[in-house]
Image (tube, helix red, strand yellow):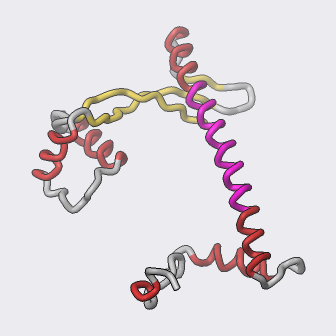
């Protein structure tokens, strides 16, 4: 018995909602059809741990790849600028272009919170960065000032075509 048993006894398990269940159901069906499958808690726990280890390794590898992409992006930004280039067509058929987009950075949380509240957005307890960026870009496109408490920076992006 856990301390939450009474509270959670009639609560559906996470993942039991209708949306997105098809992929899980297909994976589960594949596992159950596997001749090596064993219906035991210890077998499933071993499988779970092995998959989590695999996921952790992939996450580590992805983190390294993302760091290298960030480093290459910064190097490309400087080199393209030095060469006066903004896009290139590679001999393998890929095109690469650099462009800048507005990027917000909260500098005064309180000033931004006051503005956020004045916009009637109190229902959102946190301002997702994407939402803040969309609001900022919309205001910039209309020629309006930035929201109080937000600084404007540019972030280089690379598009692979």
Give the image quarter of residue 111. Answer: top left
**In the figure, is residue 88 to the left or right of 42?**
left
Question: Residue drawn at (33%, 27%), measured in percent from left and top?
Answer: 153
What residue is rendered at 35% in x and 46% in y? Answer: 129
Tell whether 155 sits left or right of 160: left
Q: Nearer the viewer, residue 58 or 46?
A: 46
* Region in magenta: 51-71
- Dividing the picture into quadrants, the one containing residue 133 is top left
Please tell me whether residue 77 is drawn above or below residue 136 in the rendered image.
Answer: above
Viewer-nearest residue: 152 or 63 = 63
Of helix, strand and loop, which mostly describes the magenta segment?
Answer: helix
Q: Residue 75: x and y, percent? A: 57, 19
| 67 in magenta | yes
Closest to the observer, 156 or 99: 156
Determine whether 94 is above or below 76 in the image: below
Q: Position of residue 124 (x, y in %)?
A: 25, 59
Q: Is residue 80 left or right of residue 147?
A: right
């Amino acid at each position: 018995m856990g301390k939450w048993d009474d509270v959670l006894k009639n609560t559906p398990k996470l993942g039991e909602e209708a949306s997105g269940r098809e992929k899980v159901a297909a994976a589960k069906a594949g596992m159950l059809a596997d001749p090596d499958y064993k219906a035991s808690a210890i077998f499933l726990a071993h499988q779970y741990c092995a998959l989590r280890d695999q996921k952790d390794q992939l996450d580590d590898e992805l983190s390294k790849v993302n760091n290298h992409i960030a480093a290459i992006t910064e190097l490309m930004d400087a080199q393209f600028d030095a060469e006066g280039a903004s896009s290139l067509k590679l001999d393998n058929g890929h095109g690469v272009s650099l462009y800048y987009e507005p990027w917000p950075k909260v500098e005064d949380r309180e000033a931004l919170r006051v503005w956020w509240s004045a916009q009637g957005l109190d229902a959102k307890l946190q301002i997702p960065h994407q939402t803040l960026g969309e609001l900022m870009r919309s205001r910039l496109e209309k020629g309006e000032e930035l929201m109080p408490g937000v600084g404007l920076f540019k972030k280089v992006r690379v598009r692979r075509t």
